[in-house]
Amino acid sequence: MIKENGVLEKVGEKDLDLLKSNPDEFWKGVTRIGLRAFENCSSLTSINIPESVTEIGEYAFWGCKNLISATIPKSVTEIGRGAFFNCSSLTSIAIPHGVIKIEESTFSGCFSLVSVAIPASIIYIKDYAFHRCRSLTSIKIPNSVKEIGKGVFNTCDNLIAFNLELGNKIYKTTPDKRCLLDSNNRLVAFAPGGISNYTIPEGITKIGERAFFGSSYLNSIKIPNGVTNIGEAAFKHCPSLTSITIPDSVIKIDNGAFKYCPSLISITIPNSVTEIGTDALWFCEKLTSVSLPKDLKISENAFNGCPYSLKVLRRSDEKPATETKKSEKIIDKQAETTETKKPATEVEEPKKADKAEGPKIKTIREIVKILQSYYTKLLYDKLTETEISTVVMIIENNRALIDSNGSLKNLADKIIAIAKGKDEERE
């Protein structure tokens, strides 16, 4: 244990014996608890901080997995970022009046936390402040709060209500208290506890960044008309989500919006959408079909990690009244006609080989990158005859490396199959 200029630092397990036997001696002269002071003190089960302390430093109690209770005096006016990060046994906490900010990740990973008293002095609740507080069922937010960051209540699996104090001019809740909204009707946070199917109430204009992130039990979601933007990582890590209804009012689906939704089977993107961000549907492992507007701009890697059998439907903007499906063109990852045209911005151009000869490649990562680039271009019918010959040669010259990885072998086989189909079309 080190005490320097009133700052307590580097408390070890042996120092905790003094804390238990003679707390006055332990805290003598301490005015601040320093950076990571009690980090990973596994035998610490309770802490009663004295009135002499005015500040708790960053990550002060990080990883104190057996800490059940912590008493913070009124003298404390600042609690640092991640101060109680991963205190997985902590059951309740009362933040003293005088603290104005709950810093980033302050209580993140406090799995057992069921009660939090937030005083009327709090103005800011920063990013991920209560992330992964899985036992938290409700939380009261005072009207003094003017800023709530992103991901504050993500993966709070049992949270069922936001209790917002009357008079808050910045935030409000939907009638069911499940959605927390800002003054622009942007959905900031969602309380996912005990709910599998949810229809977002009318009047919301945007779904904010990480709003539904980690909603473990959510099976289906219906977004109301009027929403124009689905924010970054809005539905990321929703493991049970199988279906989602997106209205015609949505213009943009941001980066990673549905990333890591492994149960999502199909999705229809309405004609109103003009842009899908990077990794929007990344690693949606069960996704079998995506229906898209004809000229939609798709960012790089939007469908990375999806099944090779994924079918992407490009809808025509205008359809004959008598038979609408005649104008639909299906891009199948097993076959595609050469008539289908795609915007050049959708596909990263693989480098052209100087001659139709495949080089020897040393690593699986390198061959994956090369084959994925050629494979994507094949799907959009943008390879010349020379380039098709080149990718076939690359596969033949690196068969041993490719065959050592099942997924890579499947990708290579599909490229060969599509390339063969192109040759037959030309004949």
Image (spheres, helix red, strand yellow):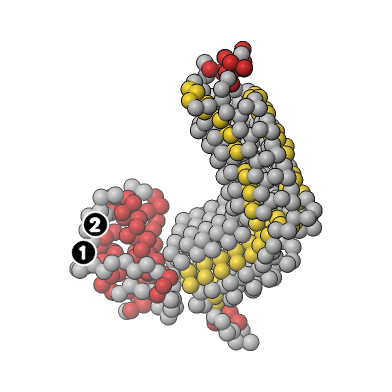
Q: Nearer the viewer, residue 406 or 13?
A: 13
Q: Are marks 1 and 2 in contact (CB under 8 Å)?
A: yes
- x and y, in percent, of residue 305 in the image: 46, 56
Q: Is residue 347 left or right of residue 138?
A: left
Q: Nearer the viewer, residue 124 or 425?
A: 124
Q: Secondary structure at mark 1?
A: loop
Above/below status of 310 relative to 52:
below
Task: Name the residue carrying label 2.
Answer: 397
Q: Secondary structure at mark 2?
A: helix
Mark 2 crowdedness (10 Å alpha carbons): few <14, some 14-19, many ≥20: some
Please report the residue visible at 60 percent of the width from the left and 67 percent of the height from the top: 229
Quadrant showing the C terminus? bottom left
What kind of residue is marked 1? Answer: Glu
Mark 1 crowdedness (10 Å alpha carbons): few <14, some 14-19, many ≥20: some
- x and y, in percent, of residue 6 in the image: 53, 27
- x and y, in percent, of residue 321 in the image: 63, 87
**Disc ID at residue 262:** none
Please report the residue visible at 70 percent of the width from the left and 58 percent of the height from the top: 170
Specify the farthest residue to the bottom. Answer: 321
Specify the farthest residue to the top. Answer: 21
- x and y, in percent, of residue 25 in the image: 58, 16
- Residue 336 appears in view: yes
Please report the residue visible at 52 percent of the width from the left and 28 percent of the height from the top: 7
What kind of residue is marked 2? Answer: Asn
Q: Number of callouts in the render?
A: 2
- Residue 68 appears in view: no
> Gap in Å between the C-alphas at discs 1 and 2?
9 Å
Please report the residue visible at 59 percent of the width from the left and 21 percent of the height from the top: 27
**Disc ID at residue 357:** 1
Between discs 1 and 2, the one toward the N terminus? 1
Q: Is residue 220 left or right of residue 286?
A: right
